[in-house]
Image (cartoon, rainbow, N blue to C red):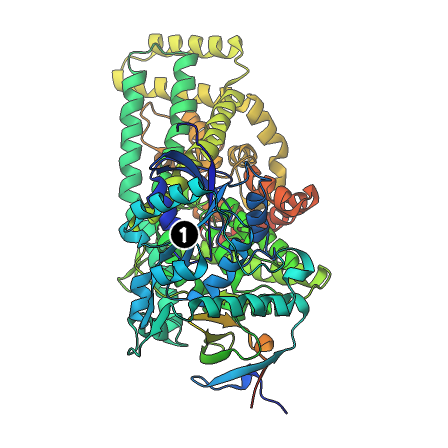
């Protein structure tokens, strides 16, 4: 099983390998700087474990686990 | 405003200080293009360049020109000149602390080919991150003027104006990477990567990075998004806001009440008694009073909302709350519209435009009026203050504050199943992508906060205020007419009889006052409003309402806050002893035809619960119609809310009576 963004521990970084979301979501994620080769760091998870706060480039955003599960991380 | 020479559009990502810059450039010289609300409107103001004033349009903040949300759709319309004249030039604001993603959007803006000036903001934040962006080098790389500014300190604004004047004078259009801007081609992965590639190339010799320790903003974030401390902080912040509204607004409301009272006396005392004096005192002045008394609460609430938005905490609240909303098929993004609806559902519903998913947006819109808006607050506060004892629980919490909190919670508690059912029975759509930027924390800009507060208050007084005043006068008229001469003649005869038969002066005065009361009661009972209220009152008997309460509720269909003005008119007319000692006194003195009080705790509770859930607000329904594109949704909202309000009101009344509060 390949590694996905939601598998990363708090504080762990990885490099995006691919996006498997539907088209509109993929476009938006890419526009926000999440695409193959981008470095992402999981900072923490919200109180009930979802969503997750991640660092992309120089900023932070909140992403749901089920969406993070569709972001492949290069192993 | 002198005629503008041309229009300049101000564009940028959200959270980069765009509104602050806009306010700094245009000062007070601006107007609102649509309904106010940070995310949904656009503002137009005058920006004074060295060569004269130009029109500056503040576009909604967006990440891209590919229209994903209605906000971004509006950006496109404004840029293409579909809303007012097309801009002749662009002022792009970018965040120096997050240059790459900002340059992605800039690449699209520059591909529009308009003369462009770039304002490089937040250099101080960038430096705290160990990031330095060289404005000159960036200008050289991009081929357009780049001016380093600090919007909140008003630094670099003169240079910005000069650069814009020069740029427009030269008329040279910006040149971006030249990639597709519209349709499917713009959303092609290769195009998006191409734009990021362009951004990286442009930034290569422009930025320098150095290692820095953990930043203050990050330390704050760690606490405020913590699973224990973060939730605690959220509860504390929300609790503090409600306590402030209750505690701080009261003295201001009392002051305003006193001023209106004093002003009313000043106008009324030289006037002869009669229908005109009645119109002024019971219609107009009572109406004005009930509008103004309302302003402190709105101001306080929007003061907090504006601060939370400006300092970056709003996004955290969405982050913390998302899991809960996700269960209802909504997202943390619904939190802001729903929270705003606690002030007023109208801006709340309008702010749902930031929700990209249509079904999530519609659901949020339809439950938004269940949030206890500030128009309900006077209904609550008047009834609570008049009928609930101010006991303290554990010597700390005022019992009345607790009831107020419970009423706020009621709307939320009802909204949960309603939202769930709406999502369930609305055809399932694709789950919305929940993506929220968590911007760095910053000190809120005083100017931005104050502007938000004053705008909101002015909007309320002019829009809602005129409806309230008009209804207060109409209700007064419905309650004052017809005026049968026989009724007056009858009482005149009885007064003369008392005059002749009673010797003792105090008894004479008391009987005279009693006759006055009876006369006014008779007048009211046979008025148009009284007839209507009596006719439909059986419908509201399960809620314990007297027909006059039913009358007031009827009169508040255009706007629920009207119920206060209406009750003021209805009860001061029937319970009046000559002095206008305020609505609270009039209400607690009101008696039914059999002499028992109109308002018991049970009735006050059922009335508050009814108003917590009913849809007595024409503006809200009109906005739902406009935003959903269908009258059907407005009618649906009115029906479901009225049924719920009636049921809950009846339930609470009978429960309270059972507990001996009747």
Closer to the camera, B206 or B217? B206
Question: Where residue B12 sits: x, y (%)?
Answer: 46, 54
Q: Secondary structure at mark 1?
A: helix
Q: In which quadrant of the rendered view does residue B28 lie?
A: top left
Q: Which residue is mark 1?
A: B18
Q: In which quadrant of the rendered view does residue B240 lie?
A: bottom left
Location of residue B392 with respect to B551 vertically, above or below: below
Closer to the camera, B286 or B584? B286
Asked whether residue B655 appears in the rendered view, the answer is: no
Question: Where residue B135 sits: x, y (%)?
Answer: 35, 60
Name the residue rendered at 47%, 8% in the picture. B489
Closer to the camera, A49 or B210? B210
Location of residue B304 with respect to B382 vertically, above or below: below
| Label 1: few (<14), some (14–19) or many (≥20) C-alpha neighbours in 10 Å | many
Asked whether residue B201 appears in the rendered view, the answer is: yes
Q: State which quarter of the image contains the C terminus of chain A.
A: bottom right
């Amino acid at each position: 099983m390949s590694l996905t963004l939601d598998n990363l521990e708090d504080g762990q970084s990885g490099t995006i390998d691919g996006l498997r979301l539907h088209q509109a979501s993929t476009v938006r994620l890419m526009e926000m700087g999440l695409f193959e080769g981008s470095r992402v760091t999981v900072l923490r998870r919200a109180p009930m474990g979802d969503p997750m706060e991640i660092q992309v480039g120089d900023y932070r955003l909140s992403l749901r686990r089920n969406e993070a599960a569709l972001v492949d991380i290069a192993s | 405003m002198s005629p503008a020479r041309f229009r300049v559009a101000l564009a940028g990502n959200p959270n980069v200080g765009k509104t602050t810059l806009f306010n700094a450039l245009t000062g007070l010289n601006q107007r609102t293009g649509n309904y106010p609300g940070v995310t949904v409107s656009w503002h137009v103001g005058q920006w004074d360049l060295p060569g004269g004033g130009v029109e500056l349009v503040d576009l909604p903040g967006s990440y891209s020109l590919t229209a994903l949300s209605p906000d971004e759709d509006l950006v496109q319309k404004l840029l293409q000149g579909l809303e007012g004249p097309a801009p002749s030039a662009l002022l792009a604001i970018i965040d120096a602390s997050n240059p790459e993603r900002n340059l992605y959007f800039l690449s699209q803006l520059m591909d529009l080919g308009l003369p462009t000036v770039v304002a490089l903001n937040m250099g101080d934040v960038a430096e705290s991150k160990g990031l330095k962006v060289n404005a000159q080098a960036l200008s050289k790389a991009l081929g357009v003027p780049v001016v380093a500014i600090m919007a909140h300190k008003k630094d670099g604004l003169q240079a910005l104006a000069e650069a814009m004047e020069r740029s427009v004078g030269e008329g040279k259009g910006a040149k971006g990477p030249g990639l597709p801007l519209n349709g499917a081609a713009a959303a092609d992965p290769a195009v998006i990567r191409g734009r990021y590639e362009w951004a990286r190339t442009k930034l290569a010799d422009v930025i320098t990075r150095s290692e820095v320790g953990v930043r203050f903003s990050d330390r704050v974030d760690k606490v405020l998004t913590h699973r224990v401390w973060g939730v605690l902080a959220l509860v504390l912040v929300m609790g503090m806001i409600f306590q402030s509204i209750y505690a701080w607004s009261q003295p201001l409301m009392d002051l305003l009440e006193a001023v209106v009272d004093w002003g009313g006396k000043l106008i009324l005392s030289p006037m002869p008694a009669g229908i005109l004096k009645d119109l002024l005192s019971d219609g107009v002045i009572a109406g004005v009073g009930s509008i103004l008394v309302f302003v402190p609460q709105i101001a306080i609430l929007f003061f907090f909302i504006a601060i939370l938005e400006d300092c970056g905490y709003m996004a955290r609240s969405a982050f913390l709350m998302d899991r809960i909303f996700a269960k209802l098929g909504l997202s943390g993004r619904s939190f802001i519209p729903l929270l705003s609806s606690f002030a007023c559902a109208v801006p709340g519903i309008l702010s749902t435009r930031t929700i990209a998913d249509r079904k999530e947006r519609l659901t949020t819109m339809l439950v938004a009026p269940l949030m206890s808006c500030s128009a309900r607050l006077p209904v609550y506060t008047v009834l609570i203050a008049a009928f609930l004892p101010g006991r303290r629980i554990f010597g700390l919490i005022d019992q009345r504050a607790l009831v107020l909190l419970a009423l706020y919670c009621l709307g939320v508690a009802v909204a949960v199943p309603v939202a769930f059912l709406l999502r369930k029975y609305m055809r399932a759509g694709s789950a919305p992508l929940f993506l929220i930027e968590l911007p760095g924390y910053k000190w809120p800009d005083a100017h931005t906060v104050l502007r938000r507060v004053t705008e909101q208050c002015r909007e309320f007084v002019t829009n809602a205020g005129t409806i309230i005043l008009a209804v207060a006068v109409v209700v007064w008229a419905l309650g004052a007419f017809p005026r049968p001469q026989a009724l007056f003649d009858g009482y005149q005869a009885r007064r003369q009889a008392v005059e002749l038969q009673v010797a003792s002066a105090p008894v004479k005065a008391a009987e005279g006052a009693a006759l006055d009361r009876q006369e006014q009661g008779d007048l009211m009972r046979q008025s148009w409003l009284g007839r209507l209220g009596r006719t439909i009152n059986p419908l509201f008997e399960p809620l314990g309402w007297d027909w006059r309460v039913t009358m007031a509720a009827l009169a508040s269909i255009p706007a629920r806050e009207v119920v206060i003005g209406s009750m003021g008119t209805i009860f001061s007319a029937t319970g009046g002893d000559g002095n206008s000692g305020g609505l609270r006194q009039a209400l607690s003195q009101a008696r039914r035809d059999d002499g028992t009080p109109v308002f018991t705790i049970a009735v006050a509770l059922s009335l508050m619960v009814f108003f917590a859930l009913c849809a007595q607000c024409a503006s809200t329904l009109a906005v739902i119609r406009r935003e959903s594109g269908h009258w059907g949704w407005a009618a649906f909202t009115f029906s479901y809310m009225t049924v719920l309000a009636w049921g809950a009101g009846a339930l609470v009344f009978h429960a309270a009576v059972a507990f001996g509060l009747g």
